[in-house]
Amino acid sequence: MCRAANGGARKPALEEPLLDDYVHVTASGGEEEELNPQHGATDSTERQGAAGLAGQAEGRGRLRRGRGAAALPAVHAGLGQQLSRLWRRVVTACLRAACRCWNSLRELMSWCWSALGISPPPPQLSLIQRDRLESLQDRVAVPYDADSPSHQAALVALWEAAFPGENFPQGTKSERWKDMGWQSDDPGRDFRAGGFVSLESLLYLAQREEPTFRRLMGKVDGQRSEWEYPFAAGGVNLAYMLTDVLDLRRPGKLPATAAGRSFVRLLLETDTAFEEVFVAAYVLLDKRWLEMRATYMEFPQVLK
């Protein structure tokens, strides 16, 4: 044992690291392998944690893929509905544009025919228009029959609308009829020209357009003449004139007049087209009567 040159105590020799605790050389003298128990346990825990995280990530991926696959049918259904709505809108817009073009073309052709003095071809009627036209022509051809139960029932209904609360006269005759505008005490005599369709038209006015019926029958509008036209008889004459203007007295044939050909278009909308035209025409007639300040003897001129 040696002493230091300055006489101090000798320092203890440094202990060599215990390599066996850290490195183990395999029997074949090959690669080194970590054998530290604490370090190995930590590494194993890390590997298990990494494996767990990887499993969780894979599970979340599978869940997302599952949700995406489940959502695909709903996405496809929603997209199909949107495309269907868009397609309906496109088709509707195209049909409207086609109708506008067709109406404009038809008006142009009508103008050309009028300018050239050529009668336009007869309208092409749908089945419902043709059925309603034939039914109306048959009605126009029916004369009033006082012995018919249906005709008598219509007359009773007209009386009740004109004079509510009053009993219908036995035998039909009554002076009260004159207050409604019939020319005698028996309204059946005034139906000779207009037929049963004129009674139906007056009844439609009374039941469907009651305020207008009251106003026209009571002559409440404007400054009236001292000698007024008779309301009921005037309605019969108006109905007869309309059947003539609209050319409805030729059963089985299309109207030949311009007014008649325009009228058949209304038959596509309603089966009461004639009655509605009758109401509008009666309102117009009364207005013109007031504007002309006409009297009873001038009624035929107003009717024209």
Image (cartoon, grey):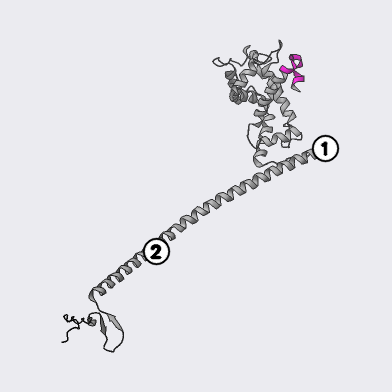
Q: Is residue 190 left or right of residue 169?
A: right
Residue 303 is drawn in which quadrant?
top right
The residue labelled by disc 1 is: 115
* In the image, residue 232 above or below residue 28: above
Q: Which mark is residue 61?
A: 2
The magenta-colored residue range is 290-302
Which numbered mark, 1 or 2, is in the foreground of this view? Answer: 2
Image location of residue 111, percent across then percent down: 79, 38
Q: Which mark is residue 37?
A: none
Kindly tell me whether residue 288 is visible in this rendering.
yes
* In the image, residue 166 above or below residue 132: above
Q: Is residue 63 left or right of residue 176?
A: left
Tag 2 or tag 1, which sits nearer the N-term?
2
Image location of residue 60, percent across then percent down: 37, 62
Q: Main secondary structure of the magenta part?
A: helix
Q: Neighbour class for label 1 at 10 Å: few (<14), some, many (≥20)?
A: few
Q: Is residue 35 left or right of residue 188?
A: left
Q: Neighbour class for label 2 at 10 Å: few (<14), some, many (≥20)?
A: few
Give the CA distance from mark 1 to mark 2.
79 Å
* In the image, residue 56 above or below residue 88: below
- At label 1, the amino acid type is Ala
Is-magenta flag for residue 284?
Answer: no
Kindly tell me whether residue 194 is visible in this rendering.
no
Between 46 and 86, the residue placed more toward the observer is 46
Question: Which element type, helix, strand or loop, lies under badge 2?
Answer: helix
Furthest residue toward right = 116
Q: Quadrant of the N terminus?
A: bottom left
Question: Which element type, helix, strand or loop, lies under badge 1?
Answer: helix
For the residues bearing labels 1 and 2, Cβ distance under 8 angstroms: no
- At label 2, the amino acid type is Gly
Image location of residue 134, percent across then percent down: 68, 36
Is-magenta flag for residue 294?
Answer: yes
